[in-house]
Image: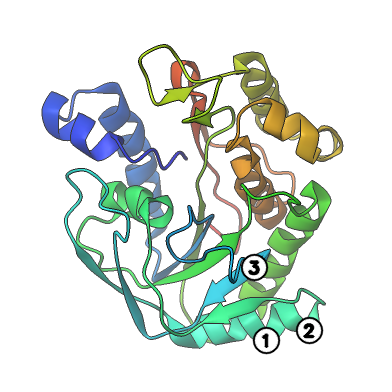
Amino acid sequence: MPHTPSFIAEVKANGESSETARFFGEIRRHLAAACPDVIVSISNDHFNTFFFDNWPTFAIGTADCTAGPSDQTPEMPWYEVKIASDLAQHLLDCLMADEFDMARSLEFQLDHAHLVPLHFLTPEMSIPIVPVFINCIVPPLPGSRRCYRLGRSVAAAVARWTGGQRVAVLASGSLSLEIGGPRAFENKTFGVPDPEWARWVLAQVRTGQTEALIEAASESRMLAAGNVAGELLNWISVLGVIDAATPDILIDQPALGNAFAAWTVRGVA
């Protein structure tokens, strides 16, 4: 799903009948039906948790708790968020064993990338999370196949988890989006430079054509769709988790370069 920071103020202004509220509502009902005990949240940072003095390709938060938003997301309340630190450590151990050189942090806060989806899906923040970060905006980006393999490793680690908990995996980001750059819409802070790319991406997701998507999603092709369109890598990581299953829900939001999707897979929801 997307993590557009203006969504919270928009829904507050326009109510639960707004398009954004309805789309998040569909995913929220899907998540509630899965009854997760913990959420592995895969997303990127926007220079709030990390900066150029320490900008990891992949990272995981292993603290006991965190908070946010660290970027003053409009109308978002301040949240204290519990981290499932035992599962976080298990994922870290498994990913390192799978030769992913993960950075980790024991002291950090979260920005809108993780918290906008959680605000709409679990507004009481009653479900502990494990935050995983992928560099989606600062070249060189990790390869799309590498991110797919990261998702496969997350799925394998969850399958080996002996904590007896149901685990949901959540990823967020846009498919075509320019923030503050030359391809922003007139009198707007954002633009959607390549809606046709976003439609093509969704067609591959809809039909389970993951290999075609991985082959096409080079750094140059993603960034041609916007300076933060590398957030597609978060989606690709979840395609690794669910491994070629077709979605139960797929909702396009073309005017914003966004989409919403949900899968239920045996062992992982």
Q: CA distance from mark 2 to mark 3?
A: 18 Å
Give me the C-alpha separation between circle 2 and circle 1.
6 Å
Is disc 1 placed on a helix, strand or loop? Answer: helix
Of the image marks 2 and 3, the number of the one nearer the N terminus = 3
Residue 160 against residue 109 in the figure, above or below: below
Please provide percent x and percent y for residue 233. 67, 47
Q: Which residue is mark 2?
A: 97
Circles 2 and 1: CB atoms closer than 8 Å: yes
Do the residues under discs 3 and 1 have CB atoms within 8 angstroms? no
In the image, what residue type sits under mark 3?
A: Pro
Residue 183 placement: quadrant: top right
Q: Residue at x 80, y 51 (%)?
A: 143
Which residue is under mark 3?
A: 56
| 69 to 257, vertically: above or below | below
Q: Which label lies toward us, 3 or 1?
A: 3
> Residue 75's spot in the image, x, y percent?
17, 44
Amino acid at pointer 1 = Asp
Whether residue 209 is visible here, answered yes or no, is no
- How far, Cα to Cα, is label 3 from label 1? 17 Å
Residue topped by disc 1? 93
| Viewer-nearest residue: 218 or 259 | 218
Q: Is residue 120 left or right of residue 252?
A: left
When asked about the image quadrant of residue 2, the answer is: top left
